[in-house]
Structure formats: structure tokens, C-alpha cells
Image (cartoon, rainbow, N blue to C red):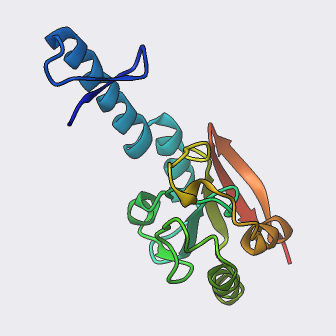
Amino acid sequence: MAGYFNEESNDTLSPRASSHALERANEHYRRMVNQTFLLNMNRLNAVTYLRQRVSRGDRFYSGLPQHQKIFVNDVMAYSLLGALPVGRWHHFDPGLQNTHAIQAQMVADFKENSPQYILLDATWENHIEQNDSRLFSGVDLLDEYLRANYVVDASFGPIFILKLKAQ
């Protein structure tokens, strides 16, 4: 049966709950969506920062601080910047981008296209799914490559902007 989330007790409220409780649950949902998927101040500041450094059509990457466990990544940044993804693996799905084969392809894309700036977003890092996507894969090829080749240039809350190291 469908219900509504009660932020205070972490319980699900029945659809027959009081209108005050439903209003609180709906407000909680609106806040969660606005803070997570829309341009909150951290995301807005990060995109503003990058717009001064990334030109339309440049190669760019929007990923995670660690790629062993994946829930979701920020694909909105590509559109807001008018940037092209580093390679084909720009939209993340649990169980794909945290595998050895795909991370090897992603590293090859980085070597071929070498974006000057990347965005790593930790917003969803502590999100726990109730399936196997909550598990760490142990694969850190991409993370090792990023650590070896990029340095933190700026940060905005859970969002880090990395710049390619001088070669």
C-alpha cells in the first residue's frame, strides 16, 4: 500500500493520515528533491566556477569521489556547461561503472580525451540501497587514475572540482 514518509519518526504514514502529517511529508519530499536534483547553492557555485573554465564543446567528466559503489551521478552538469562527456560512460548505473571492464574503458577514454576539469560529487555517497548496489565492488582503477592525474582546484560543499595536473 502506498504511504508517505514521516521525517520525524522515519515511519511511513498511511494515506489516511492527518492532512498536517501529509503536508509535512510532502514538504520533506520537496526539500529533498530541491537539495538533491536541482541547483542548490553548492551545485550553482560549482557550475558557475566551471563555466569560467570549461568552454562549450570541451570534454568534461562528472563523477564520484569513489567509483566502487555507485548510486547516481550528476549528468545535469554536462548540459549546464554545454560540455561533451569524456566517453560513453557518463550516465552511471549501479553494477556497471563500478566493474573492472568498464572502468578500464573509462580510463582509456580519459587518456584519449584528457579533460582539463572534472566534477566529483559526494552528495549521494552515503545513500544505501536495499539491494546489491549498496556493496563496494573493490574496483578502483578509475579512482587511482584520477588521483594520479588530477588535483583539487576548488570545492563547494560535497562537490569537488579537479584540474588536470601539469604534464
Residue 143 versus residue 22 in the image, above or below: below
Can you see residue 52? no
Residue depicted at 55% across the width and 59% down the height = 133
Can you see residue 162? yes
Looking at this view, is 8 or 132 the one in front?
Answer: 132
Q: Residue 137: which quarter of the image?
A: bottom right
Q: Quadrant of the N terminus?
A: top left
What is the x, y in percent for residue 143?
76, 66
Looking at this view, is 2 or 162 the one in front?
Answer: 2
Q: Quadrant of the C terminus?
A: bottom right
Q: Residue 67: which quarter of the image?
A: bottom right
Residue 66 versus residue 154 in the image, above or below: below
Q: Is residue 27 left or right of residue 122?
A: left
What is the x, y in percent for residue 150?
78, 65
Residue depicted at 46% across the width and 70% down the height = 91
| Residue furthest front as drawn | 1
Q: Is residue 119 left or right of residue 35?
A: right
Looking at this view, is 61 or 163 the one in front?
Answer: 61
Q: Is residue 72 left or right of residue 18?
A: right
Count of numbered circles in the view: 0
Residue 164 versus residue 106 in the image, above or below: above
Residue depicted at 64% across the width and 87% down the height = 105
Q: Is residue 166 left or right of residue 76?
A: right
What is the x, y in percent for residue 76?
41, 58
What is the x, y in percent for residue 107?
70, 82
